[in-house]
Structures are given as structure tokens and as C-alpha cells.
Image (cartoon, rainbow, N blue to C red):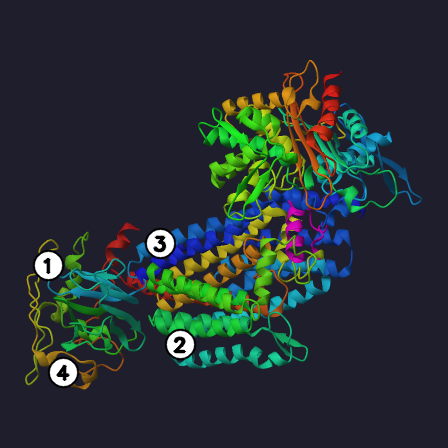
Amino acid sequence: MNIALKAKKEKRKKTSQRLLTGTVMLFVFCGFLLLFLQAPSPRTALMMAAVPLGVWAVNTFVPKLFPMDGLLLGLINFLCALGILVQYRYNPARGIAQCLNYSAGLIAMIACTVAVRHIKNWKLLMLPIMAGCCALMALPLIFRAASAGKGATAWVEFGSFRMQPSEIVKIAYLFVLAYFLSRRRVLFSMVFTGLMLGFLVLQRDLGTAAIYGATALVMLYAATSSLLLIGSILGAGVAAVSVLYMLFKNSFFLTVQNRINNWLDPFATYDQLGGGYQIVQSLIAMANGGWWGTGLGLGNAQVIPEFSTDFIFSAVMNEFGLVFSLLVLCVFALIVLRSADIALRSTSAFHAMLALGCAALLAVQTFIIIGGVTKMIPMTGVTVPFLSYGGTSLVSCMGVMGMVQGVASRNERILQEDQQLAEDSEEDMP
Amino acid sequence: MKQLRKSIRLCALMLAVLMLLPMGYGAYSLLRYGTRWRTSEYNTYLTSMKSGVAAGSIYDRNGVVLAATQTSAAADGTPSFRRVYAQEEAVRRAVVHAVGDTRRNVKNAAESFMAEYLYGANMSFLERLEQSRSGMLRGDDVTLTLDSRLSAYIASVFPENKNGAVVVMNYKTGELYALLSFPNFDPADGTAVTVSQALNRATRWLSAPGSTFKIVTLAAALQNLPDAEARSYQCTGGVSFGEHERTVRDYGGTAHGTLTLKRAFTQSCNSTFAILASEMGDKPLRRTAEAFGIGDDFTFRDLVVENSAFSSSSAALLGADLAWTGAGQNQLALTPLHMCMIAAAVANDGVMMEPKLLLQAVSPAGTQRAAFAPAAYRTALPSGIAATVREYMREVTSSGTGRQAAVSGLSVCCKTGTAEIDTQENDNAWFVGFIENENLPFAVCVVVQDSGTGGSVAAPVAQKIFRYLSGR
Amino acid sequence: MSSNAYQLLALAARALFLFWGALIVLRAAFNLLAQHRARKRLLRLLPDAGMVGEMRDVESNQAYPLPREGVLGSGRGCDIRLKGLRRRQVNFAYVDGKGILLTPCHRRTDTQLDGEPLRRSAYALHGAILQVGGYTLRIRLFAGLNVPHPAQYQEHWQPAYDDELYAPDETQMQNPYAAYMPWAQAVWPREEGEDAPVFNYAPAPQPMPSQPPQHVYAPPPQQAYMQPSQEEEYPAPLPAPDSGEPFLPEQEQAPAPFDAPRRHRRSDRRREV
């Protein structure tokens, strides 16, 4: 391709990238400025300077050091910055902790990018990864005796360090599924998925189980493109779930019954423990926000329990309004579409499936949590990607995005090689 | 890879659409239930919204002040607000369930349900700027459709020490002229309010409406049984249904003898309507009831009304249950307001208008922020059937159980009802009626709990209301 | 700042946040689409991007570009579609350092790779013959790929401008080095005692684009097929050079890359730019 055309394309790409970065910087700066005006403090002033600077630094330097997709990185940074802003507004300590989580997430993302870009022989890694998955998933069950009595026992605690293994396993699970489905070993992938789902159901973490299952279903469709197969699996799954539910409705799955009652009529169970209080307050927060929001700093989403983790989106809807929340969801959708675009450009089936799996994971998780928050589906204990407070949540989401970036950088490298070869052959022409 | 790429494209599009679905649902719920959730008692944001804003005044349709804010400066310079209500106690008591009180004892009254107007939540940014420059923030002034004088009068003629409700509605436009519930309380009084006093029986109390439901049964029979009008019916004081020989009895066991449909309606013969109901079956009757709005999820813009129910489950009714439902008992649950809306639909050629409470909301600067506009809620009946039902109801007033509601010089149509309640010693007296006059398009529903028959207890109250309305 | 003033400011800022959010979304969406289209345009300019070679039907001389991973069959989703085959016949995937991994989709197929029936999977190198469903396909890989026995050696067995013959919209370019390339003109000079070369094309000295090939593929003798496991038996009439450069008779120049039958359509595309 012509050198001049290439240069023009590069410049256009850079200006649009700068525009995105600049807008995000302005946004976050304005947000923190408002918070500073509301409650002046040196910490807020520091955040006001540091967060935009951090966004600029990451958007500018990281793609140079580790070849990455700039657009995807920009969108992810926007969401993370928004998350930090909203966390800081309600709880400054958590806001600063979220910054540290973001750094950890960035490291995870870079690690995953480098891994996916450079590792060529995945066959050898599969067995250790699968073994690691099963071991990590079994951990909470082994430790269950220690933290008995809670609804979902998907957490593992080592002293003061809490971890949710299913978030880490998510990444490995995607690798395994992508590898086997790209080689059309459908039965094996389904067995592995069933195993993972079994672990999750035993831990009563049904939201994560839904995510795992839906992602596997999407990847299965991509691999086989047979609607019949997907339909029959879906049907069998629904049947199995109903049977299990009927059998264990009042013993093992009591929380599920609870959740469904809360979903159907949260106002009726408002005063009960574990009742509809959360959902009602979330809906009220949404109604208070209305279309345009109450304004940053003027909302009162802190009355919702878990407002910084599961119901962070209600807080966004409260203060920024429904229209802005739609834009945030559009950003999520753009990330999914970009990942799919990267999958389409890939030349290897494994990498394409991997990128698609990451996109599906993000999409399904977002749908489940936001559907739960707006009472479209029953509430589950899943976090909002990028916005929620929580180390494991942010690290795993960034890791998943890192995988997509890895596929993107691999695509770019192959394309550059092809271009180089083409140019070489052209230059030598008479 | 080509196949894989094709499926990836499809999956990506589906996923993107999937992700945007919850927002669509959120937007829909906000449109439908937003006001309800915002004004819910569980909303703690209202207190912060209310602070610093002088709530606007509430007026009745004639400009009488029903509620206003008195501002005074506290010690540290911040303004403090005190809500005061109408001057006369009788007026205060009469409108308290519609207007509300400061401590929000009455759920979803105008004070809380229209808080977004009263506390200026719909102020545009520029208005807010203007107002804060002038000093104090003020909310909009709200004018209700109520007539405070009429309400005070009704409160004075309602039987003392009886619970009940009265609704007066303009059947052409849907405006509520009076919305009373008894027992009531004085919002200016500082004493504690009992649950019974705070309950708005006109909109939140559900009960079997007794024979007033026969309007619906009659409409269903006229539409589904072709020979209903022409036949003659035999009434022996009771009819048995079902294998357990449960009887539908007329009031007091009176046997009406041979009746035409019109006479059965005017005499309120339970046996006839029981026979009609069981001949029609559950489906046509239920369908007609649904056409009248029974079973709907009411989400009116101006007020919250409990949903009425045809029966406690959606399974088809049989035998004596169906018969009693046709006569107005069994598991029917309607609010007085809904019963009034049903009568209003008959009066308005079959078109049921949405009940309206807000006449207008005006900002302190004078811009009209909301104005009343009549809205048709449902078409309950074809106008021909409505005319026939009107004719029957006219008969009720002239020669039937509603004789005590007749006013000379006015064409009054009505239907009385007597609902037997197991837990009460006496029956609930129901009355629905309307004036057939272009200039007096009023429909009235009177319910007196634990009193007597509709014709003897509720109808006289309605007669006085009709007289007052017509100026006699 | 007084709470009232802050309230005003926050309410005004709502519009600002909304504006920036909308800007981000619209800009990102626009970029996504633009880059998608630009990529498509780029791929049109680099028709061989992502490809590793081609499969050529020897009888009709139809060339099918070979992507890195794909499936051969008659179905709609196949990367190489040939009529008469099963819906999905053979999966192929390029493995760096090994060649093209061919995996049959069904257990009983009549697919043959280099004469041997294709059972589970096998690596195909440049020049392998795939016989499937009545078609005979020759696998050709681009030079520069990391496979055993790279292309340069094999290509010397055929006329260098063979590819330009059948590109649809090409103007013929005279091969300026024709005089210097004895191997381009005649049958490869055989030395005594050697086996017959693998391919015995009789090349046309003046190729014309609209005419069908004047030589017909004659199945070479059986023992001349190269099996992946029998590399050591491969008759190498010339010693393999150490440097990896193509073999050159003395005092000859290296053939221009244009002649290497690699990116065969690039020459003409360049003119349009």
C-alpha cells in the first residue's frame, strides 16, 4: 500500500484517539472539580489532577509499549475513570482503593495481552489450565465450613485476603473453551462447561453460573453455527434447571425462591430480611434520577445496600440520569462490537473464538447485572464490569479485555508482516 | 473460518442488542411507574428535595386555599417553612384524604403525589437561577379539581359515626369534584392519626359492591343474551345452584314474582341476575367486567387507585359462585371510585373517562406547567347498550329501590346496592347514580359501611348531593 | 460553596456530562465503523493478506486462495467451495514450522494426500497433491513461510510466469529475465543417473492470457511423489544451498521477486495505485 496513504491513515487514527482521550480527561476533571467545589479537600484536588493525567498516560504510552488496540483501551479507560469518579463521590477511601485496583487491573491486562500475543503452542498449556480451573473452583467448597451460613459461598478467605476464585477461573475457562471449540471438540467443551457449572451451582453462585453458561452457549453457536444444537441445549438446560429447582426449592435453593419473590413484587417483601428493600431502593433511585439525573453530588444512592458493588449502576442512573446511563451502556456495547471486530480480523480460529468469548462474557455479565438492577430479571450477585468496586472484579475484567487486546495485537503483527512482504516485493519491482 | 466469521458477526449483533434491552425496560418502567416510585413512602430523597424549598400552595377549583406554606426566618437566618391548611375545619376534614397532611399519614395524597410540582422539581435551570437570585426557592402552585364547598357539605350530610366514602365525578371530563373518606381527621391537629382515619376509602378500600354491580351484569346480559330483554323471569325469593344446593337469596327473602328484566333491575332482584349470570357463564361476564376496567392495573396520572378484582383467582367461576358474582357479592372487590367510574361510563355513552385531580400547576413566575386535559380511559360499552342501561337506571329512581334519591325537576339515574359482609352486623350501603343533564354532568358514588340497605341509607345522602349540585 | 450555588452548578454540569458522553460514544462508534471499512479496503489492496498460499485445481487451473485456517467442502460456509464434495470435507490449518495440517471431517472419506488415503490428519507441504471427490488440487505455499522445504526449491520445476497466465484482468508483462532463466524455458536439464523430475511440464514460451494452457497435467510416476515422511528419498538433482538463496547457475542474476509465483496479482494492483 502507498506510504502516503498509510501515513494519512495513521494521523487520522491518532487525532481521533486524542479526541477520545481528551474528552475522557475533561469529563473526569469536571467531575472531580464538582466534587472539590462541594467539599474542598486536598485529596480531591489530588484526584482532580491525577486521574485525568493517568487516563492520558495510559492512553498514550501503553499502546506504544505493548501494541494494543487504542480504541478499546480508550473506552475501557473511560469506564474505569467513571467508576473511580462515582466510587470517590460516595466513599473517598474506596475511590482511592479503586485506583489501586485499576493499576492491578492494568498489569493484568498487559500480562494477558503479552501472553496471548506471544504464546504459540496452546496445546501444552491446556492441561495445566484445566487442572487449575478445577482446583480453584473446588477451593470454596473445601473452605465452606469456615464461612457457613451465607447465601452464596463463592468466596475464599485467607485471613484478611478475600478472593472470589470464579473471577480468576473465568479467564482460564475462556482459554479452554476457545481451544477446544476451535478444534470442534464440542462434546468435551460441553462436559467441561457442565463441570464448571456444577461447581458454581454447588456454591450457589447462580449469577456467575448463568454467565459461564451463556458464554459457552454463544461460543458454541459460533463454533457450530447450528441453531438446532443451541436450541436443544437451551431446552435441556431449562428443563434441568426447572427439575432441580422443583426438587430443591425449599432446601438448597431457598435463596433462589427468595430472589424470585423479590423480583416479582419487591414492595411486598420490603420489610423482610433479604427482601425487596434493595430492589425497591434501586428503583426509587432510578426514578429520582429521572431522565437527566439529579446532578453529581446531589443524589442519595447510598441508601441502597451494596451500592458500590452490585448497584453501582443505580447510583449512575441516579446522579447522571437515564439518558447518560444509556450512553454508558452504549460504551459497553461498543467494547463488545470492537472485540467482535477484532475476532473477525483474526486469522486463527482459536484467537477468533477467544475474542468472541471475551465479548460474550462482558455482554452477558452486563446484561445480567443491569437487568437485575432495573428489575427486568431477578437479582443475582454479579458485579458491573469496570464500574464496581472490588479488586477481583476489576482485575478479571481487565484481564479478559487484555485477552482481546492480545488477539488484536497479534492481528496487527500478522498484518504488518503481510504488508511488509508486499512492500518488499513492490520495492524490488522494475 | 468463513462460517466462523459469519456466526461471530451474528453473535456480536445479538449481544449488542441484548445489552441495550435493560435500558429499554428501564425507560418503560420510568414512564409507567416513575411517579409512583418517586412519591412512594420509601423514598428518602424527598426530604432532601423538600428542604430549602417553599412548597407551593394547593387551591381548589374555585380558588379556595387548601394548603399553603408559611415562611419565617429561623434564628440562624435559614428560612423555615410551616404548612398550613384550609381555614375552616370542616373543609380541612373533608379534603384531607385528597390533599394530604404534613406527616404523610395519607398515602399518595396530593401533597406527596404531586410533590414534583409542589417542590419545584420540574423547574428549568434558568428558573432555578432566577429564583435563587431572588432569594427563596418556591414550588409551583397546584389547583385541584375539587370543590371544597361541596366536599364540606357532603361531610355534613354523611351519616355520623359511620365509615364510608363519597365520590363525585364529572362524567364528561373525568374531573373529581369531591373525594371523601370517612372517618377523617384534621390535618392541622397535632394528635396521632389512626390507620382507619388515614385510609382513603374512596381509592384504597376494596369491597363487594352489592347490587350496584348489576349494572355490569345487565350490560353483559344485553350484549350476550339476545332475548334477555324480552323474556320474563320468575323470582321465588331464592335460586339454588350447584350440587350443594347453595342458594342465592333475595334481600329479605322477598319473592318478586314474574318480572321483566327492567323490573328485575329496578327491584334489584338477586335471583334474576343470578340466573342471568349462570346462563351467560363466566367468560362473557368476565369480559364485560374487564371492559369496565375490573382487573386492570390502574396507573392514573393524578392519583393512585387500588386495582379491582373480579374474583380472587383467574379460574372460571361456576355454579353459586358465579351466580353470587352476578348479583354483586362473592369475591368481587371494587373501590368506590371505580364504581363511580362505571356509572360515569354508562352516563357518558359508554366511554369511561380517566379520573383527574389536577386542574393546573402554575409556577411562581406564572408559566403553566401542567394543565388538565380530559382523557378517555376505556370504551366500556357500545353507546346503544349504554342508552338501554341508562333507561333502566332511570326506572330505578322513578319506581325502584332508588326512589329516595329522586329530585324533582332533575332526571336522575341510579342503582342502589346492599352488600352483605360476614364480619359486619349490618350491610354496606352502596349507591351509584348520575344526573342526566348537559349542564350538570355529575356521577356520584356513596358508600356507607355497616349501616343498612342502599336505598334507605345511601340514597338520601345522594339526594342531598344532587340537590346541592343543582342548586336547589 | 453554598449548597444552593452548588446545586445550580451540578444541574448545569449534567448537560456537560451528557454532551461529553455523547461525544465519546458517537466518536467511538464512528471510528469503529471507519476502521472496519478501512480494514476491508486494505484487504482488498492486499488480496493475499492472511493467506498462506493457494490450492490449484490442476485440470481447470483454477486457483483457490488458501487462508490460514479453513474448511474445504461444498457447503456455504466453506472457505474453499467445490461442487460435488460433502458439505464439509477437509479442515486445513497452517501450523508454523510444519505445514498445512489437513484433517478430514468424516471418518470415511475418499480423500487422498499425495496418493495416500487421508485417515486422521497429515501435514501437507508445498507441492502436495490432494485428491478429493474427483478434484485434484495442488497445494502451493507462499515463499517466506516457515515450512520445511520452502517454495524456492520446488518452483524451479515450473515456468516462473505460470501464474500470470490465468489472472482475470491482467495485462501480460513480458518476463524481462526470460533470457537469463534457462529453467524458465525448457525442461530442467537432467543429469545422468537421476530420476525423472517430479513435474514434467512442457512450458509455452510465449504465454497468452486468453488461451487455455497448452500443457496438460500428466500424472507423474508414482515413486516421484514426495511423502512427508520420506523426505530423505526426495530426488534432489541439485545440492541445497546453505544460505537459503535460490539456486542460481553461475553468473546469473537472481530472479526478480516478481517472478517468484508468490503474490501473483500484486504487480497489476500496484498500477492502479
Q: Is residue A324 visible?
A: yes
- Whichever of callouts 1 and 3 sits on the residue coming sooner in the sequence is 3
Q: Element under label 4?
A: loop
What kind of residue is marked 1?
Pro
For the residues labelled 2 and 3, the Cα–Cα distance comes to 29 Å
Residues beneath discs 1 and 3 located on the same chain: yes
Point out the tag, 4 or 1, that comes first from the N-terminus. Answer: 1
Q: Is residue B58 above or below residue C158?
A: above
Residue B266 in the image, given as x and y percentages of width and height = 60, 25
Q: Is residue B28 above or below residue A420?
A: above
Per the image, the residue denoted by label 2 is A122
Q: Residues within 10 Å of mark 1 (few under 14, many from 20)?
A: some
Residues drawn in magenta: A276-302
Within-10-Å neighbours for mark 2: few <14, some 14–19, many 20+: few
Does residue B333 belong to the magenta stretch? Answer: no
Direction from residue A226 to residue B337 in the image, left or right: right
Q: Say which of A339 and B331 sits in front.
A: B331
How far apart are the two marked residues, 4 and 3, measured between alpha carbons? 44 Å
Per the image, the residue denoted by label 1 is C207
**Which is more N-terminal, label 3 or label 4?**
3
- Position of A422 relative to B13 (above/below): below
Label 4: how many residues lie within 10 Å, few (<14), some (14-19) or many (20+)? some
In the rendering, at what x and y percent does residue A368 appear? 53, 59
Q: Nearer the viewer, mark 4 or mark 3?
A: 3
**Chain of the residue that carries numbered disc 2 in the rendered image:** A
The tag on residue C235 is: 4
Neighbor class of circle 3 (other Cα within 10 Å; few <14, some 14-19, many 20+) is few
Mark 3, residue position: C40
Three-letter amino acid code of the residue under disc 4: Pro
Q: CA distance from mark 4 to mark 2?
A: 36 Å
Q: Same chain for the residues at labels 4 and 2, yes or no?
A: no
